[in-house]
Amino acid sequence: MSRARILGLICLTSSRLEVAEWHTERSRTRPGGDDVDRTHEAAEAQAARWKGSGADAWVAAQGYLDAMYRPFADLLVQAAAAHPGRVLDVGCGTGASTVAVARELGADADCVGVDISETMVGAARDRARREGSSARFVNADAATHAFESAAYDLVVSRFGVMFFGDPARAFGNLRRAAAGGARLRFVVWRGMAENPFMTTAERAAAPLVPSLPVRKDGDPGQFGLADPARTEQLLLEGGWTGVGIRPVDAVCTLPETELDSYFSRFGVLGPVLPGLPEPTRARVVETVRAAFEPYVHGDEVRYTAACWVVDARAAEDAPGR
């Protein structure tokens, strides 16, 4: 069983999983131009992947992924324990965090998970049935879904809010779903430079696959909310207040036997690898596997995940209400 432990938490309170390949088309003529088009096209590509092969890969690997990311689900559970009530889990995936929160809140828990992937929502419902959980799940895009107004006292997310094409509008939609004074807590990745494990595969494969997509901090995807100042501004624009952002480092592990599965299914390399000619694919797998050796310790792979924990409170006047 994978183990993980939370390392030191440093509070930076202020006053104010896997990225798909995308293709950029010619910009439409309007304010924002190329940057706006790239952002929306990237978000659309993300959504398409999570509705298709990305979801299938995640469901197949959910056992070791849930164990690997358990420290971050625990942070959501802590928020629910401190602020019990009606809970919305955004980008819930296969439901590990939603079910964990419902378990913390007990038999009368009112917890709803929402995800854009029908496949993952199906897996989440199966999980809830197996575990006898009261958690419920909705297949929808949290950025635009018509949630019941003021229906939730706590909104949480474990790596589910970095993919929005228009983050401020999406956070505004979540604010409308939240009651006045409701709490928000989510976990997102810090920058690529602070998460070398997460970019090992693409850096190793790039010389062999020149067409491999290049990603950067701030693009919709894993590192979409790497800049805490930008994240805070987006939340303020979306109707949230009292924003607090703190870094969390967690030591995460996965079984060494799952390493090849991990790097061949997820990240930038995952969608590209199956389409490579067999000789190239074999060389890429061998090269990438060797690049991960510094993280292999006996029968487990161990790395430090560098993330932000973001807390906020719903302003009393929701945008558009």
Image (cartoon, rainbow, N blue to C red):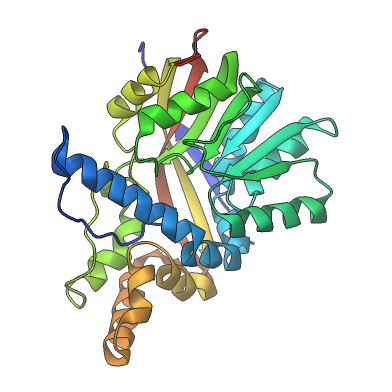
Q: Is residue 18 left or right of residue 216?
A: right
Instruction: Provide residue 287's location: percent of width, then percent of height.
Output: 29, 79
- State whether residue 62 appears in this view: yes
Q: Is residue 237 left or right of residue 118?
A: left
Up/down of 86 relative to 262, above or below: above
- State whether residue 298 appears in this view: no
In this view, the residue in front, 237 or 41, is: 41
What is the quadrant of residue 201 in the picture?
A: bottom left
Instruction: Provide residue 171's location: percent of width, then percent of height.
Output: 44, 28
Q: Is residue 188 left or right of residue 287?
A: right
In this view, the residue in front, 261 or 116, is: 116
Residue occupying the point 34% across, 25% down: 234
What is the quadrant of residue 56 in the picture?
A: bottom right
Residue occupying the point 65% across, 34% down: 77
Residue occupying the point 53% across, 37% down: 157
Residue occupying the point 42% across, 64% down: 266
Q: Residue furthest bottom?
A: 279
